[in-house]
Amino acid sequence: MSGSAFVSVERLRKEFIGGGLFRRHSIRAVDGVSLTIARGETLGLVGESGCGKSTLGRAVLRLVEPTSGRVIVDGTEVTALGTRELRRFRKRAQMIFQDPFASLNPRMKVGAILEEPLIIHRLGRTHVERRREVLRLLERVQLRPDAIERYPHEFSGGQRQRIGIARALALQPRFVVADEPLSALDVSIQAQVVNLLVDLQASEGLTYLFISHDLKIVQHLCDRVAVMYLGRLVEQAPAVSLYHRSLHPYTQALLSSVPSLGARRSRIILPGDVPSPAAPPSGCAFHPRCPRYLAKGRPERCSTDRPELSSVGDAEQLVACHFPEEN
C-alpha cells in the first residue's frame, strides 16, 4: 500500500436548508471534514446514525454537491469538475449503496442493469461485446450466468447486493464508496460479502471508503478508521491502534457498546441524546454528553473552543479532544 494520498478530502462541508417558509435554518450534515486515503487502502468511517457518514460519502463523489471544501481523487480535483468532466470521472469512482433492493430498478432484468452503465459510457461497440462483459461481472461476484435473464426480486438480499457490487465494478473504477453495504443483510451472509469485497480489492486494485456502524466488521475489513460525531471527525487512526488504544471518549463509548469488543472494557453509558445538527453545541460538539468533561468539572474550553484533529503520541493517530486519554 502506497503512503501517498490517493483520495484527499479538505475541509469538506455540506449544509442543508430546513424549516418552513418563514422560519428556515441551516443543518451542517458535514462540518469541515478532512481525511486522506492511500492507494489500495480501506478507510472505515463509523459513527451513530445521523452523524453525517452517508452524506460525506455522497459529497466525496458529488452525488450531492458540497457546500465548500475540496475533494481530490488520483490527482483530479473532483469539486472543480464541470458536468462533462464529472461524467468522465464516474468511470473512476463508484458507489455501493446500502439497500440492494431500492438501488436496483425492479423493472429491468439483471443483464440490462449491468449493461446500462456500459451503454451510457460507450464501453463495448456491440451488444454482444457488452453482454460478454456482463457475464464476466457476474462471474466476478460469484453469480450464475442465468442471472442475466432474471429480475432483482427473484434474488435473495445477499445476491442483490452482489448485483449492486457488479454494477459498481462495471466501469472498472479505482475508488469505491461502500455505504453500509452489509446493514440490510443477514449476519450469515455478511461474511460472504466481506470476503468478496476483500478479494475484489486485491484483484481489481480498489481503494475503499467503507461506511458502517458495525464496529466488528470495520475491525476485520479496514486498514484505518475515522470516527464521526455530529458532522465532524473526532478520531482517526490505524485500526489496530484505534481498537487497542482509543483516545476520544466518544470512540471509547462506541467500542464499549459492542460485546465482543468491550469484553475487557467497562460499559460507558453516555448521558442525554445526540444534539440536533440544526443547533450543534458550541466548542466541542460532544461536550454535553462527555463523561470526561463532566468528571473534570466542566472545563470552559470544552464548551467554547472547538478542538481540531491533532496527533497524540503516535503520529498516525489523530484525536479532536482537549483532554485526550487512553482507555
Image: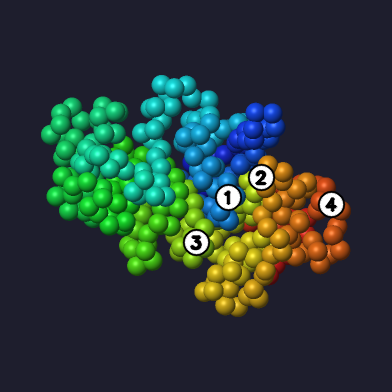
Q: Quadrant of residue 127?
A: top left
Residue pointed to by mark 3: 214
Proximity of marks 4 and 1: CB atoms separated by less than 8 Å: no
Question: In this rendering, is residue 66 above or below 195?
Answer: above
Query: Which of pointers 4 and 1 lies earlier in the amino acid sequence?
Result: 1
- Distance from Cα at disc 1 to Cα at disc 3: 14 Å
Residue at the (71%, 57%) spot, across then down: 312
Residue pointed to by mark 4: 301
Taking the image as shown, residue 12 lies to the left or right of residue 279, namely left
Query: Which of pointers 4 and 2 lies earlier in the amino acid sequence?
Result: 2
Dot 2: element: loop
Taking the image as shown, residue 114 lies to the left or right of residue 186, namely left
Q: Amino acid at mark 4?
A: Arg
Query: Which of pointers 1 and 3 lies earlier in the amino acid sequence?
Result: 1
Q: Is the residue marked by circle 4 packed among few (<14), some (14-19), or many (20+) residues within 10 Å?
A: some
**Residue 81 in picture, x, y percent from top left:** 49, 24
Front position among marks 2 and 3? 2
Q: Is residue 318 visible?
A: no
Residue at the (36%, 45%) spot, across then down: 102
Q: Amino acid at mark 2?
A: Pro
Query: Which of pointers 3 and 4 lies earlier in the amino acid sequence?
Result: 3
- Distance from Cα at disc 4 to Cα at disc 1: 26 Å
Residue at the (44%, 45%) spot, across then down: 177
Question: In this rendering, is residue 263 above or below 182?
Answer: below
Q: Find residue 50 and name its label.
A: 1
Query: Which of pointers 1 and 2 lies earlier in the amino acid sequence?
Result: 1
Q: Amino acid at mark 3?
A: Asp
- Distance from Cα at disc 3 to Cα at disc 4: 32 Å
Residue pointed to by mark 2: 277
